[in-house]
């Protein structure tokens, strides 16, 4: 019996250690994926566009911002030349009664921001359409993406002057709360727009996504409401709240 108890104890200890290692590994992987996602190289369609932008009615200039951010500036060709996408979008907009400036002129500037794991060249086809519609497009590589020299995404922490190694200290709570409030506020339009796509999903998928949408949105709202005290302990939703969100 003592031998069996000893074996079981060793097995439980081993399983506990394995669980700790697995959890730590998952946390490390998730943190790395969020803060420093794998960078994508140039795709074939990126290189084709860059090699002959004029055929698409676009002039591309590269420049580097003062903080090291690499950018592409796309402007319409002054002679009014447009590519296939540009000609089509002008036809569609004109057909809807929208008055466009003459092809080749610039009436405004737009900044296009890629998503996670993206890079600035992803937006070249969109820039082609916007340039044909009379806009100048500025497309940067965001931190930890594309050719940006920064290795990690800081979500406003670096810009707020908070040392990464010390951001959990109480002295930085007010600045962190300000960043969290801004991020939660900026997320609201995306939460709202996401509801429109739920109708195109199968019922079970739509239900699962809507529930996750509600839970994570509520966590953000609670973090915003708690202000500087949000970091005193982990913020989560109660079982009652989860059930309520499941039912709505």
Image: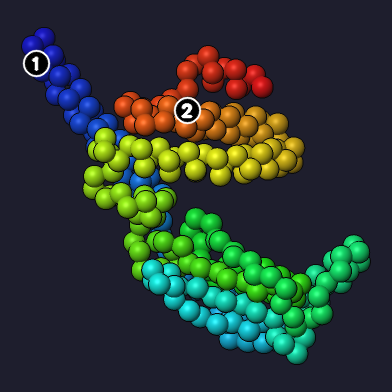
Camera-nearest label, 2 or 1: 2
Residue at screen point 47% across, 32% down: 224
**243 or 1: nearer the viewer:** 243
Q: Is residue 198 above or below residue 40?
A: above
Q: Give the position of the N terminus as an image quadrant.
A: top left
**9 or 209: nearer the viewer:** 209
Q: Earlier in the sequence, mark 2 or mark 1?
A: 1
Mark 2 neighbour class, 10 Å CA radius: few under 14, some 14 to 19, many 20 or more:
few
Q: Quadrant of residue 56?
A: bottom right
| Direction from residue 198 to residue 89 in the image, left or right | right
- Residue 238 x/y as whole percent: 47, 18
Dot 2: element: helix
Q: Is residue 98 above or below residue 29?
A: below
Marks 2/1 in contact by CB < 8 Å: the verdict is no
| C-alpha span from label 2 to label 1 | 55 Å
Residue placed farthest to the bottom in the image? 79
- Residue 164 x/y as whole percent: 28, 49
Q: Is residue 2 above or below residue 142?
A: above
Mark 1 neighbour class, 10 Å CA radius: few under 14, some 14 to 19, many 20 or more:
few
- Residue 216 x/y as whole percent: 52, 32
Looking at the image, what colour scheme do you see?
rainbow
Tell me the residue that label 1 is attached to: 3
Q: Is residue 139 above or below residue 195?
A: below
- Residue 202 x/y as whole percent: 71, 36
Residue at screen point 22% across, 27% down: 16
Tell me the residue that label 2 is attached to: 225
Marker count (numbered): 2
| Direction from residue 125 to residue 103 in the image, left or right | right
């Amino acid at each position: 019996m003592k031998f069996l108890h000893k074996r079981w104890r060793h097995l439980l200890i081993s399983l506990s250690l394995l669980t700790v290692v697995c959890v730590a590994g998952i946390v490390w992987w998730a943190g790395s994926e969020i803060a420093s996602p794998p960078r994508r190289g140039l795709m074939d369609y990126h290189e084709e566009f860059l090699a002959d932008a004029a055929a698409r009615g676009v002039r591309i200039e590269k420049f580097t911002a003062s903080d090291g951010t690499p950018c592409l500036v796309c402007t319409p060709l002054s002679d009014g030349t447009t590519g296939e996408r540009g000609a089509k979008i002008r036809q569609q907009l004109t057909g809807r009664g929208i008055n466009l400036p003459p092809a080749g002129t610039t009436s405004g500037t737009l900044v296009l921001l890629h998503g996670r794991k993206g890079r600035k060249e992803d937006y070249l086809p969109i820039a082609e359409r916007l340039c044909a519609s009379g806009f100048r497009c500025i497309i940067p590589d965001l931190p930890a993406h594309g050719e940006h020299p920064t290795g990690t995404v800081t979500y406003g922490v670096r810009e707020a002057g908070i040392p990464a190694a010390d951001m959990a200290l109480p002295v930085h709570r007010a600045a962190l709360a300000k960043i969290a409030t801004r991020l939660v506020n900026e997320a609201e339009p995306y939460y709202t727009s996401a509801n429109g796509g739920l109708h195109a999903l199968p019922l079970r998928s739509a239900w699962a996504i809507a529930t996750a949408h509600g839970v994570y949105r509520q966590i953000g709202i609670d973090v915003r409401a708690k202000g500087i005290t949000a970091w005193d302990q982990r913020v989560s939703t109660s079982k009652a709240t989860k059930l309520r969100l499941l039912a709505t």
